[in-house]
Amino acid sequence: MGRLLTEERAQATVEMVVVAPVMIVLALIAYNVADFSAAVTRFDRVAPDIVMAHAVSPEGEGGAGTPGRVAGYLQEAMEGYRVKVDVACEGGGAATASMFDLAVSPTTYRCTMRYEPWPGGLSIAGVDLGAPLALEHERAVVIDPWKPGVVV
């Protein structure tokens, strides 16, 4: 009878050893999903404001209208999150090569946020334990150059 009690007591230890890694992985996934959704919410809120404020301004000394400059401001606004920001500009050129033609098409700024889940560069005994993928989110902001402050 004493032998049966010994086997039953060890069962909880074995169950904990099996379930603990699964619970840790699920907790990491939940943390990364929550962090990514918070980063997406902030990115969607600040991207149009930064594009309106800096992309349509004249280039001047610092080259404020360049996509690289806008990406720098976006990266600064996303400080505290593990994201990398890239901005691409499409359109905005003159419709024809005529010097007197004032028809300029709207400009589209494609702001892309790349989120790298945590833990990223974790390596134990030569085995990479980090997440194998990165999540991306894109926000397109279309600006009409003839209507200041208008985002389409």
Image (cartoon, grey):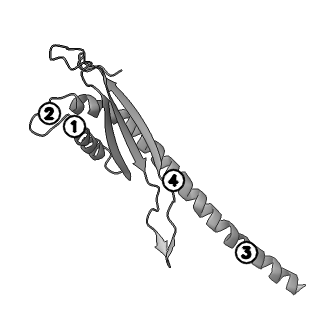
The label on residue 14 is 3
Q: Seen from this angle, which residue lies furthest bottom? A: 2
On the picture, is 108 further left or further right than 63? right
How crowded is the residue under tag 3: few (<14 C-alpha within 10 Å), some, or many (20+)?
A: few
Residue 57 location, x and y as percent?
18, 29
Which residue lies at the image location 62% right of the left edge and 67% below the top edge? 21
Q: Which residue type carries mark 2?
A: Glu
Q: How many marks?
A: 4
Q: Which residue type carries mark 4?
A: Tyr
Asked if the residues shown at circle 1 and circle 2 are in contact, with their CB atoms under 8 angstroms apart, the answer is yes
Nearest to the observer: residue 119 or residue 105: 105
- Image vertical order of residue 126 relative to residue 3, above or below: above
The label on residue 31 is 4
The label on residue 37 is none
Q: Earlier in the sequence, mark 2 or mark 4?
A: 4
Q: Which residue is mark 2?
A: 59
Q: Earlier in the sequence, mark 3 or mark 2?
A: 3
Query: Marks 2/4: CA distance?
Result: 41 Å
Residue 28 location, x and y as percent?
54, 58
Query: Marks 1/3: CA distance?
Result: 59 Å
Secondary structure, mark 2, is loop
Which residue lies at the image location 43% right of the left edge and 50% below the top edge? 115
Q: Earlier in the sequence, mark 1 or mark 3?
A: 3
Residue 83 location, x and y as percent?
38, 50
- Image vertical order of residue 98 relative to residue 70, above or below: above
Secondary structure, mark 1, is loop
